[in-house]
Image (cartoon, grey):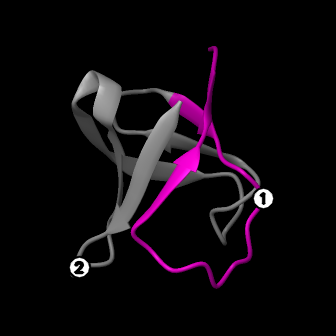
Amino acid sequence: MKIMIRKDSAGILTVYVPKKDLEERIVQMDKPDLWGGAVTLSNGWRLELPDLASDTRLPLTVEARRLEG
């Protein structure tokens, strides 16, 4: 699914899912640099993110995969 990842002025990362009109905070990351691992959203969803360079600029739209469980 296509998602947009943003960082607000306070440094909080959020994910926006356009097809669901859903915006949630990222509350946990498997990897400290965000990319190439899974993230957990505040609503409990887990998404697997693509492998990108750690200095990738935000906001960015990427293809993510929703993980079960």
Measuring from the top left, give residue 56's x and y in whole percent. Answer: 60, 78
Q: Residue furthest top?
A: 69
Q: Which mark is residue 19?
A: none
Q: Position of residue 62 (x, y in %)?
A: 56, 50
Residue 6 against residue 25 in the figure, above or below: below
Does the segment drawn in magenta span residue 14?
A: no
Instruction: Say which amino acid is labelled 2.
Output: Ala
> Label 1 sits on what residue type?
Asp
Q: Quadrant of the C terminus?
A: top right
* Residue at image mark 1: 51
Q: Residue at x 64, y 14 (%)?
A: 68
Q: Earlier in the sequence, mark 1 or mark 2?
A: 2
Measuring from the top left, give residue 26's x and y in whole percent: 42, 50
Q: Is 2 situated left or right of 22 in this image? A: right
Asked if 63 appears above or below 32 in the picture, the reply is above
Q: Which residues are magenta?
A: 46-69
Q: Residue at (58%, 35%) from the top-left corner?
A: 47
- Residue drawn at the location 25% of the way across and 73% of the way down: 8
Measured as percent of width and height from the top left, residue 36 is found at: 76, 55
Indicate the quadrant where residue 22 lies: top left
**Label 1 SS:** loop
Give the CA distance from mark 1 to mark 2: 25 Å
The residue depicted at 43 percent of the width and 27 percent of the height is: 44
Disc 2 crowd rating (10 Å Cα; few below 14, some 14-19, many 20+) is few
Mark 2 lies on residue = 10
Q: Residue 65 lies in magenta, yes or no?
A: yes
User: Is residue 63 depicted above or below 28 in this figure?
Assistant: above
